[in-house]
Image (cartoon, rainbow, N blue to C red):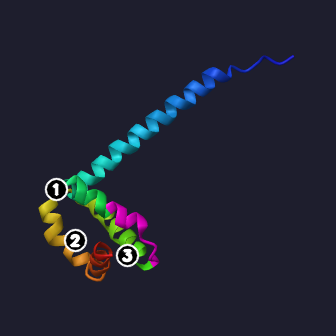
Amino acid sequence: MRKPRDLDSKLKSLEAKSRDLKSRKVQQLGELVIATGADALSTDELAGALIVLAETNDAGKRQAWAKRGGAFFQGRSRRTASAPERDTGRATAQSGGVQPATGDGGAA
């Protein structure tokens, strides 16, 4: 006869892992907000921008945002410049065609 499994302890372990993952996700989102400079926005502005982003179904805009986000992360890994240097240098040069799509998303 097989030994019965302790399902309660496994469930508690899974719940603890789930809490840890949620906590890590919240921390990483906060770090992302700070790294992008979005912490300078008010809570209402940030929430509004995220709502518009989440509600956007335009594949072209989403692809442009994803491309710009990917460039942001690639730039961060290669260079540890401060936010003002990054904004005046790299972001302006890289986002040439992408920026109008972002601007249109805010107007929608």
In the rendered view, tell whether residue 77 sits above or below residue 12: below
Q: Position of residue 67 (x, y in %)?
A: 37, 72
Q: Position of residue 84 (x, y in %)?
A: 12, 62
- Report the Cα–Cα distance between label 2 and label 1: 17 Å
Q: Quadrant of residue 83?
A: bottom left
Q: Position of residue 88 (x, y in %)?
A: 13, 70
Q: Are marks 3 and 2 in contact (CB under 8 Å)?
A: no
Instruction: Look at mark 2 in the image and give the residue it sits on.
Output: 91
Q: Quadrant of residue 106?
A: bottom left
Instruction: Look at mark 1 in the image and give the residue it sits on.
Output: 40
- Badge 1 marks a residue whose secondary structure is helix
From the image, give the main secondary structure of the stretch colored magenta: helix
Which amino acid type is shown beneath numbered disc 1? Ala
In this rendering, the label closer to the viewer, 3 or 1:
1
Q: Taking the image as drawn, is residue 60 in sight?
A: yes
Residue at 46 percent across and 34 percent down: it is 19
Residue at 56 percent across and 25 percent down: it is 12
Q: Quadrant of residue 36?
A: bottom left
- Report the Cα–Cα distance between label 3 and label 2: 13 Å
Which amino acid type is shown beneath numbered disc 3? Ala
Instruction: Look at mark 3 in the image and give the residue it sits on.
Output: 64
Marks 3 and 2, the one that precedes in the sequence = 3
- Badge 2 marks a residue whose secondary structure is helix
Marks 2 and 1, the one that precedes in the sequence = 1
Is residue 64 part of the magenta span, yes or no? Answer: no
In the rendered view, tell whether residue 90 sits above or below residue 40: below
What stretch of residues is rendered in magenta? 50-59
Residue at 44 percent across and 77 percent down: it is 58
- Is 39 on the left-hand or right-hand side of 25? left
Marks 3 and 1, the one that precedes in the sequence = 1
